[in-house]
Amino acid sequence: MNLKQKLLRRIYPVLLKINRIMHKNDTHLSSAKKALSSIYDLSVTLNDGTQLPLQNLKGKKFVLVNTASACGYTAQYAALQELYAAHQDSIQLIGFPSNDFGAQEQGSDAEIASFCEVNFGVRFPLAQKSPVKKGADQNPVYQWLTDPALNGWNDMAPTWNFCKYIIDEEGNLVHFFEAGVAPADEAFVAALDI
């Protein structure tokens, strides 16, 4: 962990408190519309180049999180790993490293994987680094997550690193949580129903 990353890890609790005070922990809930296309038709290219067909996750809830290694919220990796370790039989977690917010993810896929494992014990799958913000090169999974014509209701793209999307056991997008919502936050845990 470099000096910047160590400093950011120390200020993480302060960032969470500031977000709570400023009411930045917005969540968006599904308006119960059925998705117009299935997320199960998509596949995630993992950081080792293999494919994870999302149809393999049928019957499981899953959480999709855009991540970065040099962000004030990077310490969320530890809590996400704890969540994954405790509930991996019923919840799948997938991290999507992205360099979309202030050059906070500049490493290669191998460097990102090593950083996450060494510093936070991350064992949940990480996708190949890709853009998550809306645009021509946006990751196809994030195209689905942020297009109401595809997912049925949500148009919220990540506003920063560590935004969280929850997909239910039937493949419906049911929640969007801003970056400032920690994985141990009551609202997030309640949404997972664990």
Image: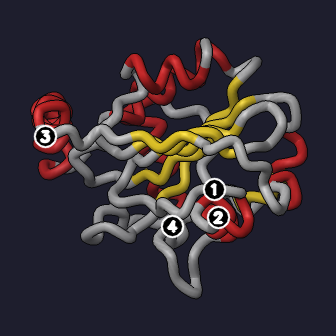
Marks 3 and 4 in Cβ contact (< 8 Å): no
Q: Name the residue under label 2.
A: 148
Would you call the spot at circle 4 few (<14 residues within 10 Å), some (14-19), or many (20 or more)?
Answer: many
- With 164 as the anchor, is 57 left or right in this view? right
| Tag of residue 166 | none
Q: Mark 4 points at which residue?
A: 132
| Tag of residue 153 | 1
Mark in the foreground, 2 or 4: 2
Name the residue located 43 percent from the left edge and 51 percent from the top edge: 67
| Tag of residue 22 | 3
Query: Disc 4 marks which amino acid?
Result: Val
First in residue order: circle 4 vs circle 1? 4
Residue 180, compared with residue 126, is above or below; it is above
Query: Disc 1 marks which amino acid?
Result: Trp
Would you call the spot at circle 1 few (<14 residues within 10 Å), some (14-19), or many (20 or more)?
Answer: many
Separation (CA) of disc 1 from disc 3: 26 Å
User: Relative to the observer, which residue lies in front, 129 or 149?
Assistant: 149
Residue 61, compared with residue 65, is above or below; it is above
Separation (CA) of disc 4 from disc 1: 18 Å
Label 4: state its secondary structure: loop
First in residue order: circle 1 vs circle 3? 3
What percent of the width, then of the height, locates residue 91? 69, 26
First in residue order: circle 2 vs circle 1? 2
Separation (CA) of disc 2 from disc 3: 28 Å
Marks 4 and 1 in Cβ contact (< 8 Å): no
